Image (tube, rainbow, N blue to C red):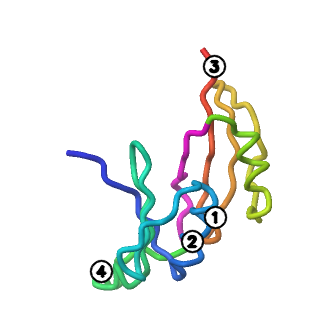
Amino acid sequence: MDFASIRIITDDVDRLAGFYEAVTGIPAVRPAPVFAEFRTGGAALAIGSTATVAMLGDHAPRPGANDSVLIEFLVDDVDAEFERLRPVLSDVVLPPTTMPWGNRSVLFRDPDGNVVNLFSRPSR
């Protein structure tokens, strides 16, 4: 079994795809207007319209209802990424901080309220 992706369901694929293009520096792959995907070396972040899960009816994921998952990206320099992204961030949860276990992290919310963690591991 291979891990394929995490998919965020949203009411506005264009807005969220644009945000993650700014965060990752990677252009979204858009095979259809209702879907966007960002592939990195080890995983993919997918963004899907509510139309992509409509067949699930009342069991479909609800946009903006996530309160238990963090979307994490390993970066070389947390502080530099924070400065680069500062103009597009409207909800910083935790400014660049060294965590008790040694990682350096910055946490913020995407336009749908999902928490994003950019982190770097301690130097060895």
Residue placed most toward the observer, 84 or 62: 84
Give the residue number, with chain letter if any, for mark 1.
110
Which badge, 1 or 3, is on the more N-terminal residue? 1
Q: Write down the region rendered in magenta.
A: 64-75
- Do labels 3 and 4 touch, CB within 8 Å? no
Determine whether, in the image, residue 75 is placed left or right of residue 4.
right
Q: Quadrant of residue 78?
A: top right
In the picture shown, does residue 99 fall above or below 83?
Answer: above
Magenta stretch: residue 74 in it?
yes
Asked if the residue under mark 1 is in contact with the one under mark 2, i.e. CB atoms within 8 Å, the reply is yes
* Label located before the other in sequence (1 or 4): 4
- Rendered location of residue 24, percent (x, y): 57, 54
Looking at the image, which residue is at 66% across and 61% down?
109
Image x and y of residue 18, in percent = 59, 70
Residue in view at x 48 percent, y 66 percent: 28
| Marks 3, 4: nearer the viewer | 3
Q: Amino acid at mark 1?
A: Asp
Numbered disc in front, either 2 or 4 = 2
Closer to us: 123 or 108? 123
Q: Are marks 2 and 4 in contact (CB under 8 Å)?
A: no
What kind of residue is marked 3?
Ser
> Quick one: label 4, few (<14), some, or many (20+) residues within 10 Å?
few
Which residue has dot 4 on it? 56
**Disc 2 on helix, strand or loop?**
helix
Callout 3 crowding tier (Cα within 10 Å): few <14, some 14–19, many ≥20: few
Depth check, mark 2 against mark 1: the one in front is 2
Q: Are marks 1 and 3 in contact (CB under 8 Å)?
A: no
Q: Depth-wise, is mark 1 or mark 4 nearer the camera?
A: 1
Q: Quadrant of the N terminus?
A: top left
Residue neighbourhood size for the residue with mark 2, other residues' Cα within 10 Å, grouped as few (<14), some (14–19), many (≥20): many
Name the residue that disc number 2 marks.
16
Separation of residues labelled 1 and 4 (CA atoms): 25 Å
